[in-house]
Image (cartoon, helix red, strand yellow):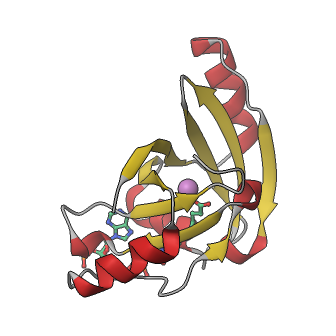
């Protein structure tokens, strides 16, 4: 297991257009990717900051992970995503260490990356996403 970097921090928002506009106005930053990821129930935008991204997430429906999070907590930090070189090896390792995986197998997420989530109750109340980028670290 080796964490390469913080790939992104996911932030749940009600209105993606409004949040992007405010990030642009207040911080002078703009997204490089924007896409709908049906299987995750989100429309997401990625704003580059140094070697990492801010990922703004708007739910596609109330009964999605981000929709439920917003209903419970309002807007705010939703997850942190760590880049790994080999996500299958990372998942095997975490399982052996007794972690609580949400995804036993990696799936395809935004940017064509392989992703998997680890339950926030597994460690420090933080929803963790592992990311293996298609073009490598
Ligand atoms: N961060 C920290 N804690 C969280 C959390 C989050 N994002 N989401 C839920 N929790 C907590 C809840 O507060 C609850 O705590 P308590 O029991 O102390 O009240 C506990 O986890 C379990 O709550 P739950 O009712 O089972 O939660 P949900 O049904 O909302 O499911 C989770 C939570 C993490 C399993 C679900 O959101 C999930 O499967 N997430 C992975 C997929 C995802 O988040 N996709 C969107 C992002 C896509 C992307 O990044 O591209
Ligand atoms: Co994410």
Rendering quarter of residue 92: bottom left
User: Which residue sits at x=68%, y=65%?
Assistant: 109
Give the number of callouts. Answer: 0
Residue 102: image location, x then y, percent = 43, 82
Residue 115, placed above or below residue 80: below
Residue 27: image location, x then y, percent = 58, 14
Q: Is residue 70 visible?
A: yes
Q: Is residue 19 visible?
A: no
User: Which residue sits at x=70%, y=51%?
Assistant: 44
Residue 100, placed above or below residue 36: below
Rendering quarter of residue 59: bottom right
User: Which residue sits at x=63%, y=51%?
Assistant: 136
The image quadrant where one finds ligand 2 is: bottom right
Q: Is residue 122 left or right of residue 92?
A: left
Name the quarter where the N terminus is drawn: bottom left
Residue 6, placed above or below residue 31: below
Residue 66: image location, x then y, percent = 55, 65
Q: Is residue 33 left or right of residue 81?
A: right
Residue 60: image location, x then y, percent = 73, 67
User: Which residue sits at x=57%, y=78%?
Assistant: 106
Residue in front for this viewpoint, 44 or 83:
83
Residue in front for this viewpoint, 17 or 33:
33
């Amino acid at each position: 297991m080796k964490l390469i970097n913080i790939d992104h921090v996911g932030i749940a928002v009600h209105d993606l257009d409004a949040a992007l506009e405010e990030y642009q106005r207040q911080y002078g930053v703009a997204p490089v990717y924007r896409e709908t990821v049906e299987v995750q129930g989100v429309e997401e935008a990625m704003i580059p900051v140094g070697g990492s991204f801010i990922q703004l997430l708007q739910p596609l429906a109330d009964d999605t992970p981000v929709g439920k999070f917003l209903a419970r907590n309002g807007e705010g930090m939703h997850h942190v995503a760590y880049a790994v070189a080999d996500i299958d090896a990372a998942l095997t390792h975490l399982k052996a260490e007794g972690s609580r995986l949400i995804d036993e197998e990696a799936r395809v997420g935004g940017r064509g990356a392989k992703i998997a989530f680890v339950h926030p109750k597994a460690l420090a109340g933080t929803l963790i996403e592992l990311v293996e980028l298609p073009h490598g670290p």
